Image (cartoon, helix red, strand yellow):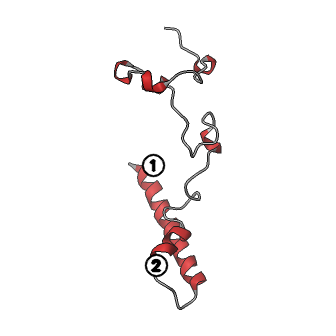
Amino acid sequence: MESIDTDDIDTDDIDTDDIDTDDIDAPHLIPRKESPLMADSSDPLNREHPRPAGTVVPWPDKRKELPEMTGDEQLVRKNWEEIDAWTYSFLWHCVVSF
């Protein structure tokens, strides 16, 4: 069986709304519209990420959930980032171990 080189296919003119995807045996060949987060769909490593690498809940997002602080915010931030890094490590451990 001869393989198809998908790099030679120009998908710019294909309207994906007209494709009946139920009959396609190879869903990875369906042309996709670009996500607003992706700068270049051909290289997913260069896309804009919704949060910094190695975090589950970034500090700016967590800070919005917390009430006004009367103490040292940098101390709370440091502890939060350590806990968040451990959480991220634990989740990755679960992904690769099971």
Which numbered circle lies on residue 6?
A: none
Residue drawn at 51 percent across, 31 percent down:
32
Q: Where is residue 24 in the image (x, y as percent from the top left)?
A: 39, 19
Q: Which residue lies furthest to the top in this view?
A: 1
Please say if the residues under marks 1 and 2 sit with CB atoms less than 8 Å apart.
no
Q: In this view, does 82 lie above or below 96?
A: below
Distance from the alpha carbon under mark 1 to that under mark 2: 32 Å
Residue 13 percent location from the top left of the image: 58, 21
Task: Residue at the far left: name it.
Answer: 22
Q: Where is residue 59 in the image (x, y as percent from the top left)?
A: 54, 70
The residue under label 2 is: 66
Q: Looking at the picture, does residue 73 appear above or below residue 48?
A: below
Residue 21 drawn at (x, y percent): 38, 23
- Between 38 and 27, which is closer to the camera in this rendering? 38
- Which residue lies under the disc numbered 1? 96
Q: Which of marks 1 and 2 is in front?
A: 2
Q: In this view, does 42 lie to the left or right of 69?
A: right
At 49% across and 65% down in the image, what residue appears?
A: 57
Instruction: Name the amino acid type tagged 1.
Output: Val
Q: Circle 2: is it few (<14), some (14-19), or many (20+) Cα within 10 Å?
A: few
Crowdedness near tag 1: few (<14), some (14–19) or many (≥20) residues, C-alpha within 10 Å? few
Query: Mark 1: which secondary structure?
Result: helix
Residue located at (56% from left, 59% from top): 54
Amino acid type indicated by mark 2: Leu
Of callouts 1 and 2, which one flags the residue occurring earlier in the amino acid sequence? Answer: 2
Left or right of residue 31, residue 97 in this image: left
Q: Which of 43 and 3 is in front in this view?
A: 43
Secondary structure of the residue carrying tag 2 is: loop
Numbered circles on residues, count: 2
Q: Which residue is drawn at 61% across and 49% down?
A: 48
> In which image quadrant can residue 25 be found?
top left
